[in-house]
Image: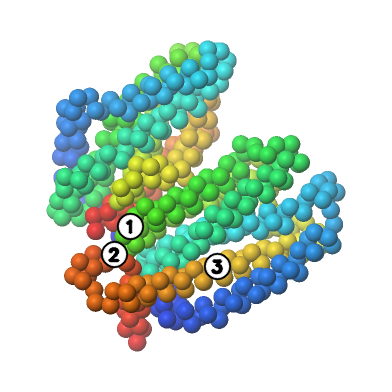
């Protein structure tokens, strides 16, 4: 386990992987969306109860999936950063947060325009909806920590703890429909007795979920790449560290970590 | 480091930090012109304002009683919390303590106990009065307050944790309120439900049990997080 993390904790090696993987993620995500959109909007059947309104689910479900996936990813990366002190893991968690925030927002928005015709209300104070709203606030809080703490190394350390604490909410979002009586429908794809939706609907839905996930992968990979480049540029601006930067280390020395891990591996 | 805070209970350093810090803080709190009353005062003002906002209808008041009292209590404890660490960080007491005894568990527990003694327990003890203001019968008010008393340690634990997480930044107060959302929301949900159940005569409701479980879970899960955050601030 640890050796895999160690390998990609090296920024140079991470960049090499990311340069190949990121375009693949982006292109396949776009392809999948191009194929799945007509399938979802035109060729899949309308619901026998909900009519054409059911088609919102091809945006709503993948967005909700990504909203929880992104936070789970952030918590996992934070745990890795906490245990093995890999700065790349912090950067990965940080890059995932904006996608998670946007997707939680999209989930709430599409849920509202789906809820209006189905439940007759834009918003109900239901456990699923409320916990999703709390997730939105946690994303905001996580990003606020990165902004509020000036020292990037320290900000990363606080942010890890926030992500780990905030993860308490993710199982609540996921299982709220099972634990409480909810207006929101329960899970229909991942179930003990198999999916309960017909394959004509399931295929475009799964394609959309995969497309969103690949998009997430592209966003995180390029986000980490950008932060590596940023760190490198900062080092170029200040090639000779002054005594104060030596002791305080105000910016995360990614390149230092690279040579450290290279030494550890070599 | 994620050292289990309670492990330090077995070692002597825990009580050697806990009691002096608690005694000193209680002394300062009582000698600074009634500063320890702040949380209680906020709670009283919040509840009174809520009564005005809802209006004098007894049915409406008794329906919102548990919600308003839990919200007021949670906010009061949350607002009292940021000061507990910033005082010691500013005057250098916390770095000195940490240099002497790197395990901050005794210090953290002293601060949680302080919050319980100065904020959440007094609020819980005063809440029967406000339940009666909110048109509950005295008996029901007492049992609804018992649920608040059971949640009092949790409110202090969550407030101290978010205060520790926000202790490193200038706008720590606002930040820690934002960070409180995920951990305080379950307490509010089950606390309000437990108080409502208690007010209708069912004291040992499932919600009260979940509130108790939540208190125990937080007592184990939150101290390591808070102490790690304090260590980051001290770095």
In this rendering, position of residue B142 left or right of residue A236: right
The numbered disc on residue A250 is 2
Q: Are marks 1 and 3 on the same chain?
A: yes
Q: Residue furthest front?
A: A237
Q: Quadrant of the C terminus of chain B?
A: bottom left
Q: Position of residue B68 (x, y in %)?
A: 48, 26
Q: Which residue is mark 3?
A: A219
Residue A258 visible from this viewpoint: yes
Q: CA distance from mark 2 to mark 1?
A: 8 Å
Q: Earlier in the sequence, mark 2 or mark 1?
A: 1
Q: CA distance from mark 3 to mark 2?
A: 26 Å
Q: Position of residue A170 (x, y in %)?
A: 53, 52
Q: Position of residue B71 (x, y in %)?
A: 45, 30
Q: Are marks 3 and 2 on the same chain?
A: yes
Looking at the image, is A141 positioned above or below residue B24?
Answer: below
Residue B18 visible from this viewpoint: no
């Amino acid at each position: 386990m640890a050796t895999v993390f160690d390998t990609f904790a090296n920024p140079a090696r991470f960049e090499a992987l990311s340069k190949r993987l990121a375009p693949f993620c982006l292109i396949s995500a776009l392809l999948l969306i191009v194929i799945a959109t007509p399938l979802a909007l035109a060729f899949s059947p309308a619901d026998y109860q909900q009519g054409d309104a059911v088609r919102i689910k091809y945006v709503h479900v993948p967005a909700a999936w990504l909203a929880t996936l992104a936070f789970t990813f952030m918590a996992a990366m934070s745990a890795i950063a906490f245990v093995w002190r890999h700065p790349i893991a912090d950067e990965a968690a940080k890059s995932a947060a904006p996608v998670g925030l946007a997707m939680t927002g999209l989930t709430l928005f599409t849920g509202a325009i789906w809820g209006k015709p189905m439940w007759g209300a834009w918003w109900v104070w239901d456990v699923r909806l409320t916990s999703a709203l709390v997730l939105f606030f946690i994303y905001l809080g996580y990003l606020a920590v990165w902004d509020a703490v000036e020292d990037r190394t320290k900000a990363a350390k606080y942010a890890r703890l926030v992500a780990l604490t905030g993860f308490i909410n993710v199982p609540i979002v996921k299982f709220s429909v099972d634990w409480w009586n909810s207006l929101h429908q329960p899970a229909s794809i991942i179930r003990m007795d198999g999916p309960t939706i017909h394959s004509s609907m399931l295929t475009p839905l799964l394609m959309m979920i995969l497309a969103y996930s690949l998009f997430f992968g592209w966003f995180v990979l390029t986000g980490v790449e950008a932060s590596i480049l940023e760190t490198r540029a900062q080092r170029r601006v200040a090639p000779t560290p002054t005594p104060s930067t030596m002791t305080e280390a105000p910016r995360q020395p990614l390149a230092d970590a690279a040579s450290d891990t290279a030494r550890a591996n070599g | 480091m994620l050292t289990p805070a309670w492990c330090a209970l077995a070692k002597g350093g825990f009580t050697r930090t806990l009691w002096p810090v608690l005694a000193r803080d209680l002394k300062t709190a009582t000698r600074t012109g009634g500063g320890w009353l702040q949380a209680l005062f906020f709670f009283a003002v919040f509840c009174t304002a809520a009564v005005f906002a809802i209006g004098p209808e007894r049915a409406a008041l008794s329906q919102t009683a548990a919600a308003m009292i839990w919200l007021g209590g949670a906010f009061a404890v949350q607002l009292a919390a940021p000061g507990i660490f910033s005082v010691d960080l500013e005057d250098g007491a916390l770095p000195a303590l940490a240099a002497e005894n790197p395990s901050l568990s005794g210090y953290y527990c002293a601060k949680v106990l302080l919050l319980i003694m100065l904020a959440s327990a007094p609020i819980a003890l005063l809440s029967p009065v406000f339940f009666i203001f909110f048109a509950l019968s005295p008996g029901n008010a007492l049992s609804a307050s018992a649920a608040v008393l059971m949640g009092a340690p949790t409110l202090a634990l969550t407030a101290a944790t978010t205060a520790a997480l926000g202790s490193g930044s200038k706008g720590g107060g606002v930040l820690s309120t934002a960070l409180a959302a995920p951990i305080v929301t379950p307490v509010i949900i089950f606390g309000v439900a437990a108080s409502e159940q208690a007010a209708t005569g069912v004291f040992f409701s499932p919600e009260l049990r979940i509130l108790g479980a939540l208190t125990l879970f937080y007592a184990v899960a939150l101290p390591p997080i808070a102490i790690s955050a304090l260590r980051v601030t001290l770095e």
